[in-house]
């Protein structure tokens, strides 16, 4: 198995994260690197979704992945198997990444040849929503077992995301999850949100998600 | 439906949370109030587990519940139906409760007649683990769909919990969840942790959990 590189992220020295995020976004635009910030609760299927995303897009775009975790490198080792460039970021107990921490991650990843950089943020529906990472687009995964009421309870996360993937739709029959109510709750927080039901395990819906992402990258480049 | 009271929690003024937590724990001991801090990811089944817990214990102990959420009062309204005393705490975007915030909640709850106060903390595996609330015991719920690797990725949460409830065991056949590996991962973080598999939906395992809690309250009072 390939060796996974791990980077210990340092706390940011900048007080004004919004400004740092705008600077990073501008720099990435100049370099032609599309940065996707992927967020969710713990265990909603971020890594499996990422594996499917890499599989769908790796022939058309060069992908680099930053796996942010409090501890462990299990996710980075999984992603490594996809053949994508990957680095494990350890946040040292911190519950989110801000723009400066994301910049450290991008430097660690060495993005010279990367066109799509994906940040798998810390599993958390609260704190990551409060910090602009400098991403081109924000995506989040809500999984069926978590319940359709989550947009009511974690409003900011759903407000700032451009796309919401509803994952684990294969287990819909076993949970009291109402897809229509879920859509309504998400759109109440963010009427512009694109909502895509998927099953990362079986691959269902992944084409729609990969197509959306490809289109976003294309129009961002234009 | 009964009116649910909501309290907007203010940010703490105390820098030394550990000291405030010890003070609160001492005061609660004097008043005979056992405080349980219940934590988990979003959507792991805290509220359903609480409903079952109240059902199992309400005839032997007077229960008061504090529902901490970023927004909404859906959980407090659910708990209200159990007949237990309940207050909704709004954290104003904050991702956890510390001892001073818990104290505000207990004052809002009016605990004169309460013997078991339960704090349903914000759904988050990171930040709540870092702040001692002054609780007599810490409990957490890990649900089957989240995966058995969570103790590897959120070490502090599993280290500080006295008991881990493994919820949603009714859906074990539909997920790649290894109960033995999960136990091993939890015990690696905390060899003293009591582990109880439950299904809050069907009631399975709730007796074992309620018995554990009753015993803890009894020995804490002795």
Image (cartoon, coloured by chain):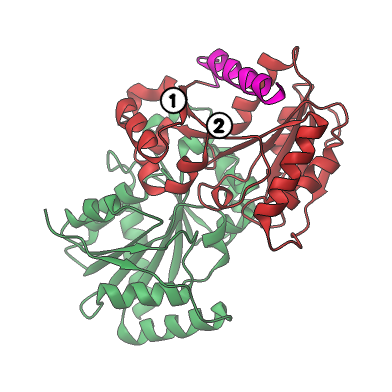
Chain colours: A red, B green
Whether residue A5 appears in this view of the structure is no
Give me the residue at 31% from left, 78% from top.
Answer: B107
How dense is the environment of label 2, judged by Cα within 10 Å: few (below 14), some, or many (20 and up)? many
Res. A210 visible in picture: yes
Question: Quarter holding the C terminus of chain A?
Answer: top right
Q: Residue at x 33, y 22 (%)?
A: A173
SS at mark 1?
helix
Picture coordinates of residue A211 (x, y %)?
59, 15
In the rendered image of this protein, does residue A169 appear above or below residue B12?
A: above
Give me the residue at 26% from left, 77% from top: B111
User: For residue A186, what is the image quadrant?
Assistant: top left
Specify the principal SS of the magenta part: helix
Q: Mark 1 lies on which chain?
A: B
User: Residue at point 51% right, 46% down?
Assistant: A125
Q: Which mark is residue A116?
A: none
Residue B194 % position (x, y) = 48, 56
Judging depth in this view, the residue of A144 and B217 nearest the camera is A144
Left or right: B111 with respect to A169? left
């Amino acid at each position: 198995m390939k060796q996974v590189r791990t980077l210990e992220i340092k706390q940011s020295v900048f007080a004004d994260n919004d400004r740092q995020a705008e600077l990073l976004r501008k720099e990435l635009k100049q370099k032609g690197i599309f940065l996707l910030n992927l967020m969710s609760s713990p265990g909603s299927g971020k890594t499996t979704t990422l594996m499917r995303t890499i599989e769908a897009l790796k022939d058309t775009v060069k992908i680099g992945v930053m796996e942010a975790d409090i501890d462990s490198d299990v996710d980075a080792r999984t992603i490594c198997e996809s053949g994508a460039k990957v680095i494990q970021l350890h946040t040292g107990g911190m519950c989110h990444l801000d723009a400066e921490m994301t910049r450290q991650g991008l430097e660690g990843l060495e993005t010279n040849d990367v066109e799509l950089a994906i940040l798998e943020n810390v599993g958390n529906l609260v704190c990551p929503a409060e910090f602009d990472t400098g991403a081109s687009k924000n995506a989040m995964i809500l999984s069926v077992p978590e319940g359709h009421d989550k947009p009511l309870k974690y409003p900011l996360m759903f407000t700032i995301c451009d796309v919401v993937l509803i994952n684990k739709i294969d287990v819909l029959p076993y949970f009291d999850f109402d897809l229509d109510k879920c859509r309504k709750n998400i759109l109440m927080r963010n009427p512009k949100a694109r909502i895509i039901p998927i099953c990362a395990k079986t691959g269902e819906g992944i084409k729609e998600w990969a197509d959306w992402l490809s289109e976003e990258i294309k129009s961002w480049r234009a």
